[in-house]
Image: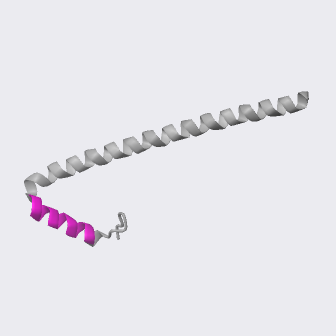
């Protein structure tokens, strides 16, 4: 049994049939293409955001380590 977002195979088939009845066989591929492009854009954007958060977290971690090292150096000098 295929599970996608908690939806089984029968439910996916039912959704497809309802969409086919609502939009017709000519519009359905266009709608699917548009949804696919939108989903791809969402994935790209979230990937870019995730990468930016990682970069910022690494920068903060480096800065924190530099401050800690400086404090330790200052304590040893005193």
Q: Is residue 35 left or right of residue 51?
A: left
Question: What is the magenta range?
Answer: 11-23
Image coordinates of residue 20 in percent, x first then y, are 13, 62
Q: Main secondary structure of the magenta part?
A: helix
Q: Is residue 49 left or right of residue 54?
A: left
Image coordinates of residue 49 in percent, x first then y, are 45, 41
Name the foreground residue: 73 vs 12: 73
Q: Is residue 64 left or right of residue 43?
A: right
Name the foreground residue: 57 vs 76: 76
Quarter holding residue 69: top right
| Furthest residue in direction top, as rendered | 77
Quarter holding residue 68: top right
Image point (41%, 44%), residue name? 46
Image coordinates of residue 40 in percent, x first then y, are 32, 45
Name the foreground residue: 15 vs 68: 68
Above or below: residue 45 compared with residue 18: above
The total number of labels drawn is 0
Q: Is residue 63 magenta?
A: no
For the rendered model, the colour scheme is one colour
Quarter holding residue 45: top left
């Amino acid at each position: 049994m295929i599970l996608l977002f908690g939806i089984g195979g029968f439910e996916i088939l039912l959704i497809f049939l309802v969409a086919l009845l609502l939009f017709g066989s000519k519009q359905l591929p266009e709608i699917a293409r548009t949804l696919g492009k939108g989903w791809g854009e969402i994935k790209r954007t979230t990937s870019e955001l995730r990468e930016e958060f990682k970069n910022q977290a690494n920068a903060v971690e480096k800065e924190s380590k530099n401050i800690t090292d400086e404090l330790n150096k200052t304590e040893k000098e005193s």
